[in-house]
Image: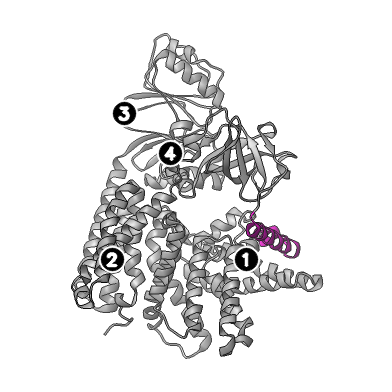
Amino acid sequence: MSVTPHVNLRRMPMLRLLMPFMLGIGCQWYWPHPPSLLGECALPILIFLFIAYRLPIVHRFAYKQVSGFLLQALLFIAGSLLAWKQDVRNNTQWISHQTKPEQALLLRLEEPLVEKPNSYKALATVKGRYTKDHLEPLTGQVILYFKKDSNSLSLSYGSQIITAKRLQLIRNTGNPGGFDFQQYSLRQGTTHQAYLTLNDYQVLPQKEEAALTKAIYRCRQAIVETLQQYIPGEKEAGLAEALLIGYKDDLDKNLVQSYSNTGVVHVIAISGLHLGIIYWLLLLLTRPLSRQSWRWGRFLLIIAGLWAFSLLAGAQPSVLRSAVMFTCIAFSTVIDRKASIYNTLALSAFVLLCINPYWLWDVGFQLSYLAVLSILVFFKPIYNWCFFPNKLVDFVWKLTAVSMAAQILTLPISIYYFHQFPLLFLLSNLVAVPLSSLILIGEIILCALAFIPSIAVKCGQLLSLLIQGLNNYVERLDSVSFAVWQNLSISPLQTALLYACILGLTLWLLHQQTKAIRIALSSALLFIGLRALSFKQATQQQQLIVYNIPKRQAIDVIQGQSSAFIGDSALLQEPALYRFHLQPSRIHYRIEEQHCINQKTFVIEGKQCLVIDTTVVFQPQPTKPVIDLLILSKNPKLYLEQIAQASTIKQIVIDGSVPHWKADLWKRSALALHIPFYDVQEQGAFVMPF
């Protein structure tokens, strides 16, 4: 007998429509096809479906399976067409197709400035380019960095600027295992960037603002100012801002890492938990309107509240998923019709992917849907393991069951993206989930009563104590030596095998499908085999890596699972720098032993390598040695011709610490001397296997 309801696909038409739609989006990204070809494929399908629909019911039934297959093919094509349209590179007015270096551009800021250590950052839309007699429309988004000065302080959402500064394509660092910022930005529609000083741009007096967007930014700013005014402590106020509206600019980075290590980072990422609390509060506040005659008015008020909060929280995919789902639940309640929760989940995904097909690759989108699906499938079977008559104990067990259920389907993809697994997630969630929910309700009360300072001050102090207690609890758990299992690395194929294993075990345990155990066992064996092979390859690897890190020297000499580091010690001493720049590579190559070396000359497999930086005093040798790899770093007071006269250079690598003007000088010299060169700032990290 099954311990969970059997999934009936007939009651979930949206799931059957969603799968080919998602496949079409994915195929268009990895194997792009022109829209003309997709249209030629869609036309005969549409004609056949139209004719089949016009047939009498008796004949229509005979073509039911064919019509179903063709409908799925049509959805596949629809997904591909949407993905093609979403790709800014396919727009004829895209800035890279049209912009000339000498022409000025009109840009509009799409968000308020965000302060960085050395600049202000903002996203901007390209409105057009100025030709001789008119403004020619262009499209595209760029990331702008403004030098900190009095002029940049006058900029805000909707500000329009004119600049002739040449836009630079966003490049990926190419560091092994590192975050692919270029692909991420492209899926956001952002392809270029620029750094602007006072003389690089002119601010126009008129702004171009959307009324709704302007109102949202003003509300967000008012909420942030209220929380900062009444909640003592920068750390506590920063967490409160993230918890209520997803504002993360003031979050303490080390605190975020602690939340991530203990498996409760979801409480500071607006998601279904927050929308669920808002939905409950709206139901409570609109209870006087629960009579039959007011049901539609109550429904509209609840939906308005849900979507207003979603927009205030930044309209991230995980937030919108929850908003669409709760909208469907509220609608089914008002029409007194119970819909399949699985169908509602699939419907929300379909709607969001129609809005932006590239959300399919958004980590928050993936984790949000997998967590909800995992809870729907596994919560009841886990909860039914034990029965507790005591209500408090039963509540704790429910919370534990939800936490365990959510981990099952999110575990493989979490390891793939974040390379770690929080071992104490049960202990952390038992406190963090109810306490963060209480804090969220308290913040809403604080904002509602901010016009009464005496009450707001007391409320803010209480919230500060609650947040401080939550932070202390999370940081204490994070300090436990076994709090997190780190440095895990799995490939996309291994991730897929883990999901196949979970699927097989689920069908076997919950639905007694004995054939499914074969899927689980074969997937597990193949996963183990691939893991063993990857570890064996790691013990035999030999690599030299020159990292692409702005203004930093970083070189790894990898032999087996040991790494010798040459470079700036700050990259190893500062946790944030190490986690971002070096740790992904160490995880990728399965490095277990790490040490630093100060020597600038070394031999790997008979190849002579030399690092020249400001600490090296270059002295010509009596003989003319062969340098297989010359790594130029920082800004040594040397000309390449001097080195070339005293040695035979086979290849040059210019690292990320070299100033641009010096890199250009060395590249011109290398061309004149006919020496091959590699610039990591333009070409990405240099990786040479031996």
| CB under 8 Å between discs 2 and 3 | no
Q: Nearer the viewer, mark 2 or mark 1?
A: 2
Q: Which residues are magenta?
A: 210-237
106 displayed left or right of 181 = right
**Which quadrant of the figure has residue 243?**
bottom right
- Mark closer to the chain start, 2 or 3: 2
User: What secondary structure is found at the residue carrying circle 1?
Assistant: helix
Q: How many marks?
A: 4
Task: Name the quarter where the C terminus is drawn.
Answer: top left
Residue found at x 32% / y 56%: 77
Q: Which mark is residue 605?
A: 3
Residue 235 in view of the camera: yes
- Residue on which disc 1 sits: 244
**Which quadrant of the figure has residue 488?**
bottom left
Q: Which mark is residue 174?
A: 4
385 displayed left or right of 113 = left
Which SS does the magenta portion mostly show?
Answer: helix
Query: Gap in Å between the C-alphas at discs 1 and 3?
Result: 57 Å
Query: Gap in Å between the C-alphas at discs 2 and 1?
Result: 49 Å
Residue found at x 59% / y 53%: 253
Query: Gap in Å between the C-alphas at discs 2 and 3?
Result: 68 Å
Q: Nearer the viewer, residue 393 or 343?
A: 343
Q: Nearer the viewer, mark 2 or mark 4?
A: 2
Query: Gap in Å between the C-alphas at discs 2 and 4?
Result: 50 Å
- Is 215 part of what is drawn in magenta? yes
Q: How busy is the neighbourhood of tag 4: few (under 14 within 10 Å), some, or many (20 plus)?
A: many
Q: Nearer the viewer, residue 133 or 152?
A: 133
- Residue on which disc 2 sits: 50
- Mark closer to the chain start, 2 or 4: 2
Q: How busy is the neighbourhood of tag 1: few (under 14 within 10 Å), some, or many (20 plus)?
A: many
- Mark closer to the chain start, 4 or 1: 4
